[in-house]
Image: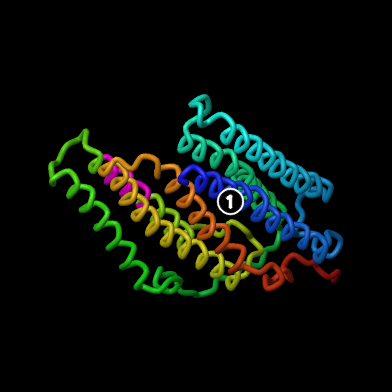
Amino acid sequence: MIEIMFYILFLSQILLFSVYFPNKIYQRMRYVIAHYPCDQYPKLYPQPIENYHRFHGNYRLANWLIAAAGLVTLTLSVVFNNKGEFIEPQVLVWLFFMLQFMPIMIIEISEFSQFKMMRTADRSSVRSAILSPRSLASFIAPKWLYIAFLTLLIAIVYGFYLEDFTISVEGSAAYAAVILFSVNAFFAGLIYWNLYGKKLNPHQTEEDRQKAIRVVAKSLVFISICASIFLMVTLSIKEYQLHSLEPLAMTVYLQVIALFSLGNSIGSIKVDELNFDLYKKEPLL
């Protein structure tokens, strides 16, 4: 029964990460090109338009190939795993997630390059400064910050409780606490950078930037809460020798992360609601 649940959840991971969300992202990219063409919005395309068409096609192809590889891997797991001749399910879930995450990473890296070229091409001598809220509470309700912090403390205390509050460098609780603190420190750094760092896109309006900051803040805070809960689940599985549940917990956790990151971003930032006027061709004087 547990194996069947794992196969269903792993199939869900394949479809969610490599079919559903990539298709949504691909549609957003094509929507921009179709509704904001380069002849009318030249500032949006610092590279030849052919490069964008090629990039979009390669992105879609890569995700379809990863999805196909996932289905083949799932089939091999069903056929051979009962004989102990295939990879461990938990390792399989994590390794395949890393593969699925690569196209998203490529998009993120390409965006940095895109914004750099935009700044280089931006020769406007007019700069404006807009006073806007720059506190975290302006972008996410404080109650979620308290919940995230409380969940973090509960997870750490629970880990030491399972080890009778024995402080040991080699203990699982100490190791988990270090990881959890490191992850949350990284998240805090990302949020701070989004709040106070330099605006990457020189043409982005302040309203659109605040939308992006709000999405990042909410996503990272919710993922922090999920990470603390996942830690408690993992420690409980280890404590009570429920190792068969590890791959189930892992794939559920990864899919929840996808919903709070990609799902939140796609659902909260509608392409047709963004302001593209600043990318338009400047009128001739």
Q: Position of residue 235 (x, y in %)?
A: 29, 45
As drawn, is 238 to the left or to the right of 197? left
As drawn, is 111 to the left or to the right of 170? right
Q: Is the stretch drawn in magenta largely helix, strand or loop?
A: helix
Residue 137 sits above or below residue 96 on the image: below
What span is in magenta? 175-184
| Residue beneath the point at 45% across and 61% down | 196
| Residue beneath the point at 48% across and 26% down | 84
Q: Quadrant of residue 269?
A: bottom right
Q: In front: 194, or 73?
A: 73
Q: Position of residue 140 (x, y in %)?
A: 43, 71
Instruction: Return the residue at label 1.
Output: 12
Q: In front: 36, or 22?
A: 22
Residue 214 sits above or below residue 168 on the image: below
- Quarter holding the C terminus? bottom right
As drawn, is 152 to the left or to the right of 277? left
As drawn, is 213 to the left or to the right of 146? right
Q: In front: 280, or 21?
A: 21
Q: Check residue 275 for magenta coloring.
A: no
Q: Position of residue 74 (x, y in %)?
A: 60, 38
- Element type where label 1 sits in the image: helix
Q: Amino acid at mark 1?
A: Ser
